Amino acid sequence: QVQLVESGGGLVQAGGSLRLSCAASGRSFSTYTMGWFRQAPGKEREFVAAITWGTSDTYYADSVKGRFTISRDNARNTGYLQMNSLKLEDTAVYYCAADRFVNGRSIDQGVKYDYWGQGTQVTVSS
């Protein structure tokens, strides 16, 4: 069992930056792939980024490539999502998720992740 708690959301102007954190407790976080997803009002949840355990391979949605960076600190049981050059369309509730068995083929599919945080709101203003 893994418990995830996101933090770091808030209100930021377009072009600004935020860093989200995902603190994990429970079983060893280092053996779990971690993903970030987001859901805007009236829209379906969408994949943002993921980082595997072990090799720390990273994956990004096309909409955030070059602007967002996912990372993890296994010693601190924490994952991060650095978000730069934020746009209005990045406004959403951001969720971190974790799973031991999700792999590259399905890493962008939220249904493959067993553990989820409660979400943190990110609002980008003009």
Image: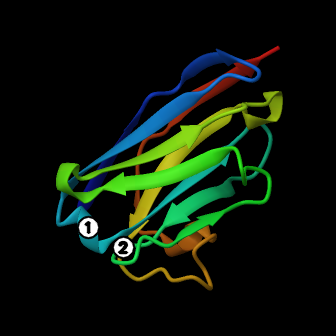
Residue lying at 20% horizontally and 48% vertically, measured from the top left: 76
Residue lying at 57% horizontally and 82% vertically, measured from the top left: 104
Q: Using the numbered discs, state the Cα–Cα distance from disc 1 to disc 2 in whole angstroms.
A: 6 Å
- Up the image or down, 97 lies above or below 114; here it is above
- Up the image or down, 5 lies above or below 77; here it is above
Is the Cβ of the residue at disc 1 closer than 8 Å to that at disc 2? yes
- Up the image or down, 122 lies above or below 48; here it is above
**In the rendered image, which residue does mark 1 sit on?**
30
Residue lying at 37% horizontally and 55% vertically, measured from the top left: 72
Instruction: Please give the count of numbered marks on the rendered protein.
Output: 2
* Circle on res. 53: 2
Query: Which quadrant does the N terminus fall into?
Result: bottom left
Residue 18 position within the rendered picture, expressed as x and y whole percent measured from the top left: 55, 28
Disc 1 crowd, CA 10 A, few/some/many (<14, 14-19, 20+): many
Query: Which quadrant does the C terminus fall into?
Result: top right
The residue lying toward the viewer, choosing from 104 and 96, is 104
Residue 118 position within the rendered picture, expressed as x and y whole percent measured from the top left: 43, 41
Disc 2 crowd, CA 10 A, few/some/many (<14, 14-19, 20+): many
Name which quarter of the figure residue 43 lies in.
Answer: top right
The residue lying toward the viewer, choosing from 19 and 109, is 19
Q: Earlier in the sequence, mark 1 or mark 2?
A: 1
Residue 23 position within the rendered picture, expressed as x and y whole percent measured from the top left: 29, 44
- Up the image or down, 50 lies above or below 44; here it is below
Q: Amino acid at mark 2?
A: Trp
Name which quarter of the figure residue 48 lies in.
Answer: bottom right
- Horizontal side of 83 relative to 57 (left or right) equals right
Q: Amino acid at mark 1?
A: Ser
